[in-house]
């Protein structure tokens, strides 16, 4: 991979063998960009791209949250709901209820730590027991009660649905940001020397 990609030092014009000043593309960079969009690019020295990713994706995600009254990013336990399978297609596969009844979270998850409160609420909160607010998170990214969900979906102006679409798009776009931090900038094609006889 290093033969087809420029390192930060190569892009900056440093001579071969110069001491590395920034983290090189790889798994750690990809993981950092998963945690916070653009963080992997920042530690690789690509500050402009890091700021672009950070502000654009977080703005998209949190604007989607705002449109949904901060009630459209969550992962329900859905213990009392019937499990879904693909038996109608001849596949005896059983999917976890949280994913079946909230598949949007599979896209929202990739925005990183911004979606972690939903995971914390999932493991700590049981909607059937209806405990009080979390001491730290309150009801932020907690599965809304059924009555509140019905109100948001049936009596609103569709902003709630549009909002979760924005959050899913932000998460899916961050997958490309993660790959960019993992693989690094692509080198431009090398120009072959022209034959003097031409």
Image (cartoon, helix red, strand yellow):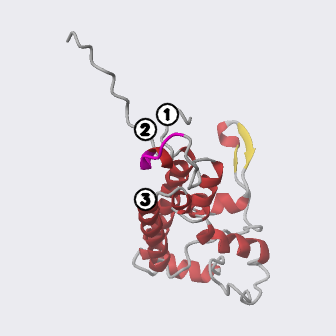
Q: Please report the residue visible at 66 percent of the width from the left and 78 percent of the height from the top.
A: 142
Helix, strand or loop at label 3? It is: helix
Pick whichever of labels 2 and 3 is earlier in the sequence. 3
Q: Residue at x 73, y 68 (%)?
A: 77
The image shows residue 174 at horizontal and vertical percentages of 51, 57
Quadrant (top left/top right/bottom left/bottom right) for the C terminus? top left
Residue name at image x 70 percent, y 69 percent: 119
Label 2 belongs to which residue? 187
Find disc 1 in the rendering and name its residue.
4
Q: Between marks 1 and 2, how big is the CA–CA gap? A: 6 Å
Can I make out residue 103 in this image? no
Q: Mark 1 near mark 3, Cβ–Cβ under 8 Å?
A: no
Q: Identify the residue under disc 3.
A: 49
Horizontal side, residue 99 vs residue 67: left or right:
right
Relative placement, left or right, of 184 versus 120 is left
Instruction: Provide the secondary structure element on which disc 1 rests.
Output: loop
Instruction: Kindly give the residue lying farthest to the left in the view shown.
Output: 198
Q: Residue at x 51, y 80 (%)?
A: 152
- Specify which label sits upstream in the sequence, 1 or 3: 1
Quadrant in the rendering for residue 112: bottom right
Region of the chain picked out in magenta, as a range: 11-16
Q: Nearer the viewer, residue 45 or 179?
A: 45
Q: Nearer the viewer, residue 21 or 135?
A: 21
Q: Are marks 1 and 2 in contact (CB under 8 Å)?
A: yes
């Amino acid at each position: 991979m290093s033969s087809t990609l420029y390192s930060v030092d190569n892009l900056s014009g440093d001579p071969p063998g110069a001491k590395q000043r920034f983290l090189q593309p790889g798994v750690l960079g990809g993981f950092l960009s998963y945690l916070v969009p653009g963080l992997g690019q920042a530690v690789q020295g690509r500050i402009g791209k890091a700021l672009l990713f950070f502000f654009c994706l977080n703005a998209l995600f949190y604007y989607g949250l705002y449109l949904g009254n901060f009630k459209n990013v969550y992962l329900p336990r859905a213990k009392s709901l019937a499990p879904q399978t693909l038996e109608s297609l001849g596949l005896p596969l059983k999917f976890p209820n949280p994913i079946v009844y909230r598949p949007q979270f599979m896209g929202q998850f990739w925005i990183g730590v911004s979606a972690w409160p939903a995971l914390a609420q999932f493991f700590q909160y049981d909607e059937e027991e209806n405990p009080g607010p979390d001491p730290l998170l309150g009801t932020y990214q907690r599965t809304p009660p059924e009555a509140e969900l019905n109100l948001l979906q049936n009596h609103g102006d569709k902003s709630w649905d549009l909002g979760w679409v924005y959050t899913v798009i932000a998460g899916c776009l961050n997958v490309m940001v993660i790959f960019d931090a993992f693989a690094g900038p692509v080198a431009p094609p090398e120009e072959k020397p022209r034959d003097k006889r031409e």
